[in-house]
Image (tube, rainbow, N blue to C red):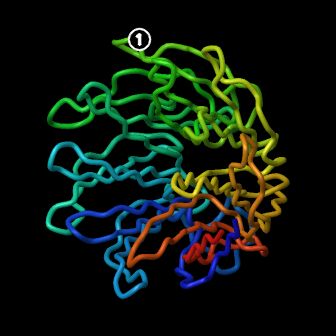
Amino acid sequence: MNIALHDIQALDTSGARAVESFEHQGTRYLVVPQLARDVAGQPARMTLGDSDVDALVYRWHGGRFVEHARLPVPGGEDAEFFRIGERAFLATASLRTGSDPYSLDTHSTIFELVDGRFEVFQRVPTSAAKQWTHFEIDGRHFLALAQGVTLGDAKPAHPSDSCIFEWDGEGFRKRQSVPSGWGYNWAFFEVGGHRLLAYADHAVPSQLLRWNGTSFEPFQELAGKSGRAFCFFEAQGDAWLAFACLHEDTVLLRWADGRFVPHQVLGGPGGREFEWIADAGLLVQVNFLHGTREAPVPRLQSVVHRLERGRMVPAHEFTTHGGTDATSFEADGQRYLVVANSLSAEVRFRTPTQVYRLAVTS
C-alpha cells in the first residue's frame, strides 16, 4: 500500500487548534477554532498573542473550502458538531480571552445551526477549556468538557474540574465532575460489554471511566503523563486504543482480558491527536512540539500508520508546524485530510492549516 498527500489548499489560519468537518443539509463545513493572533512588537512566544479571535467556518465549494462565517470563539481550542433529533449543534471551547494579561475564566459557547446560520444557544462558564465530546447512551445525550490548568497559585473564578453535562430537553446541565488537573481530551466507546469514557489529562494520570447506569466510575488508570488524546477503533479482530502524550511515548493499547494492555510504542514525545480512517486501515498521528512552552520546537514529522498483521507500520510522514488536529472526509469521489497547524518554526501563530488530497494505492 502506498500513501501520498497532495497539497490542494492552505487555509490562512492563526494558532489553529482543531479542525471539525461535517455535513449539514447538503453542505460540507469545516470549523477551525483559533487560539490567538500575533501582536506586532511582541516576542515570539506561544504563551503570548491576542486571544480575542474568531473561529473560522468554511464550506466546501468547487473542490475547495471558501469562508462561510466567523464565530466569536476567543482563545479557541475545539469545536464539536453533533445532532439531537432534527437539531444540529456546534460546541466550542475557549481557553482564554484578552492579551497579556489573559483570563482563563471565560465562557465556552454552544451554537445551534439554523438555516445555515450559527446562532448562540448556550454559554457555559469554563476555565481553560480544551475540548468537548458528545456521546449518547440509551437515547440520553451527554457533553463532556475537558478543562483546567495548574499554573501558579491563582484560584479560578469558574469551576475548573473537567465535567460531564446532560441534555435536559432545553439545554445542557452539569451532571458529574471528574477529578482532574489539566484536562485535554475525551473519547467515548463501547468494548467488552462496557461503556467507557477515556479522559486525557496533562497533570494527573489519564484514566478510563465506566458507565454504571447512573454515572461514570473509575475503571482503569493509564501509565504515562502529559496525556493529550485517544483514538478507539476495532480492526483485524481486536479492539485498540491509541493514546497520545506530549512529553512521553505515544502508544497503542489492545483490549485483552477485560482491560487495555500495552501493545506497541507509536512514537516518542510530541503526540497531540489522531484520525482513524477505517476503510483504509490508517491511523494519522499528529505531533505537536518538542521542548517546553518557553522554548518549543514546533516543526515535527507527523505520521500516517498502516495496520498490518496487528502492528502499526509507518506508511507516510509529513511535516507539521505545531500540529494540533486532523480530520478526513470524502467529496467528489476523492478522499481528503485536513491538518491544523498552530505554530510556525519561528514560533508565530500565523501558520496555514493544510488541506490534502489523500491518495491510497495498493
Q: Secondary structure at mark 1?
A: loop
Question: Residue under circle 1?
Answer: 212
Residue 55 in which image quadrant: bottom left
Q: Nearer the viewer, residue 82 or 189?
A: 189
Residue type of the residue flagged with mark 1? Asn
Residue at position x 78%, y 65% in the image: 301
| Vertical placement of residue 232 versus 121, above or below | above
Q: Is residue 43 left or right of residue 337?
A: right
Mark 1 Cα-neighbour bin, 10 Å: few <14, some 14–19, many ≥20: few
**Relative to residue 324, is residue 315 drawn left or right?**
right
Name the side, left or right, on which 94 lies relative to 24.
right
In the image, taking residue 352 as reference, residue 55 lies left or right, namely left
Residue 342, position in %: x, y?
Answer: 63, 66
In the rendered image of this protein, does residue 68 appear above or below residue 140? below
Q: Decide which of 304, 99 is in the foreground and name it.
A: 304
- List x then y, in percent, for residue 265: 81, 40
Quadrant in the picture for the N terminus: bottom right
Quarter that holds the C terminus? bottom right
Is 55 or 80 nearer to us in this picture? 80
| Residue closer to the observer: 223 or 352 | 223
Which residue is pictured at 27% across the width and 51% down the height?
89
Query: Looking at the image, which residue sits at the far bottom?
Result: 62
Across and down, in percent, residue 239 comes to 59, 32
Identify which residue is drawn at 72% across, 57% down: 287
